[in-house]
DNA sequence: TGTCAATTGTCAGATGCTGACATTAGCCTC
DNA sequence: GAGGCTAATGTCAGCATCTGACAATTGACA
């Protein structure tokens, strides 16, 4: 319990010790059980006791792995977001800010499975995304997490461009607008085929929808950057 | 409890009946006591019991006026947001979308006092805004409320321009980006003079900061709108 | 004044979450 | 491989938010 725990996801293939492996198994089991219940019967209608009973651990153990019931709902999101941020950091240095953000978003969506399949089935991750979007209390937390991510993105953009985040508002502004576009795309996608369940198709659809909206406002945002 | 309750703010000067007046008084007293406690000792460290004891009503009564502890924290925000939306609706029809949003925002900030002074002192409203921005759980709800407001704004913009909100993404996109700018301005303001407390000055500062940021990205956003 | 309906209070209980302490179980040394 | 160390888990008590049910109070209106 010394080093990670806050990361808790980014590819750590062989967690040598038996203890570590057991911990990871328990954690993943809790996440799977929680998302399964949340997506099946709804977030509010699922109690923490139901989750812990499904995994056969005490309620207290649950709250040692997750700070709150909300926390577990975002476990796979957390992994996906780390994946996205890593994609941004891996972008070539000569790319313009918006191009780098766009590329990172599309890359991350393309390889979403690699980053979370050890924890939960990607299809469950997608279903959970819809639950988040349609559950007010989860949506609120989701938006706050997005805001935190935007802050990190703005700092990374500022770093890439050699700008002072406190002196130049452009990094924050371009990220804020980028985030706005992403959210609009996600929302429209969520409202689209509400009860269809087209499995793997959904990921592609959301990815394409995002690309479409980004390309729509991209030119003018880029112009704004140069001023 | 039949008609309003959800509105609960927009200027209703003489609520004739004794019952209605008493209800409004109780409600306002709860809001004032709550915001006073929240701003003095923090949101998390304040219990609902403390609020109800200060007003001398039962806890059950509190939850009849407000659906949750979070709810009361946004009572004055709700009024301010209605004020802003009304300002947008009152804008001349020939104004461009972004100009109308800009004008409504600045007007609303200018006359913020008129819309909430019956409920709470404007200075308390401002202090509460900072508590919201700096309290994670409240910030989350705040962002969700903003998202809901943006949806309403997008629909109003679409109506003004005679567009179909489901067919043309521009209303949502311009509003999303407008909202992003507003949030950046609000965040920067909140971080600025953290412990200064310059009273009325604060409102002016935030208003000006908003105007500055809007003017910064305004031209390019307007370009985006025309295509 | 007396009846009706709305407001409030009281009570019990579900749920989320935390601290304290006991118990179990992996790990490491001798 | 026995025993001690420490991390993980379980148990229990308790606080806070929030809700339903029912009783008591109080304004409204004939």
Image (cartoon, coloured by chain):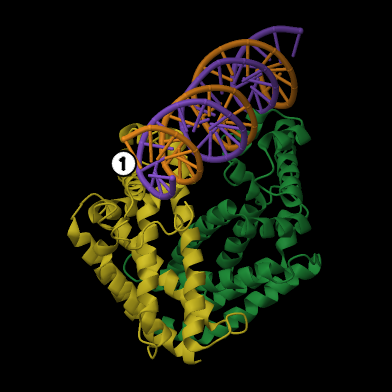
Chain colours: A yellow, B green, C purple, D orange
Horizontal arrangement in the rendering, residue A68 relative to residue B68 (left or right): left
Q: Give the SS element for disc 1.
A: helix
- Residue B52: tell me if it is visible: yes
At a point 46% along the width and 63% down the height, the residue shown is A146
Query: Mark 1 belongs to which subunit?
Result: A
Q: Position of residue B113 (x, y in %)?
A: 75, 60
Answer above or below: position of A212 versus A161. Answer: above
Q: Is residue A61 above or below residue C8?
A: below
Please state the horizontal and vertical placement of residue A87, each as a whole percent of the image.
Answer: 35, 74
Would you identify the image quadrant in which residue B21 lies? top right
| Camera-side residue of D22 and B22 | D22
User: Where is residue D10 drawn, in percent x and y?
Assistant: 42, 29
Query: Number of callouts in the render?
Result: 1
Please state which of residues C19 and A43 is positioned toward the viewer in this rendering.
C19
Relative to A50, is B154 on the left or the right? right
Residue B206 lies, in percent from the top left, at: 69, 71
The residue depicted at 69 percent of the width and 33 percent of the height is B49
Residue located at (52% from left, 69% from top): B179
- B70 sits left or right of B51 in the view: left
The residue singled out by tag 1 in the image is: A33
Q: Residue A151 versus residue B121: which sits nearer the camera? A: A151
């Amino acid at each position: 319990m010394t080093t990670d725990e806050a990361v808790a996801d980014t590819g750590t293939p062989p967690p040598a010790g038996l203890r570590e492996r057991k911990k990871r198994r328990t954690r993943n089991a809790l996440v799977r059980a929680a998302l399964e219940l949340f997506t099946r019967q709804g977030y509010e209608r699922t109690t923490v006791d139901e989750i812990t009973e499904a995994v056969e651990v005490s309620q207290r153990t649950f709250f040692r792995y997750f700070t709150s019931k909300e926390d577990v709902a975002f476990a796979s999101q957390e992994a996906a977001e780390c994946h996205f941020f890593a994609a941004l950091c891996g972008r070539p240095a000569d790319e313009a800010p918006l191009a780098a953000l766009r590329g990172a978003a599309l890359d991350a969506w393309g390889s979403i499975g690699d980053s979370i399949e050890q924890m939960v089935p990607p299809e469950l991750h997608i279903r959970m995304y819809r639950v988040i979007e349609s559950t007010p209390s989860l949506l609120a937390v989701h938006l706050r997490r997005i805001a935190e991510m935007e802050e990190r993105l703005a700092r990374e953009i500022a770093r890439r461009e050699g700008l002072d985040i406190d002196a130049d508002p452009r990094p924050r502004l371009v990220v804020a607008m980028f985030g706005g576009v992403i959210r609009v795309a996600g929302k429209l996608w969520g409202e689209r085929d509400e009860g269809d369940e087209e499995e793997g198709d959904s990921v592609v659809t959301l990815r394409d929808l995002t690309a479409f909206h980004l390309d729509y406002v991209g030119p003018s945002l880029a112009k704004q950057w140069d001023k």
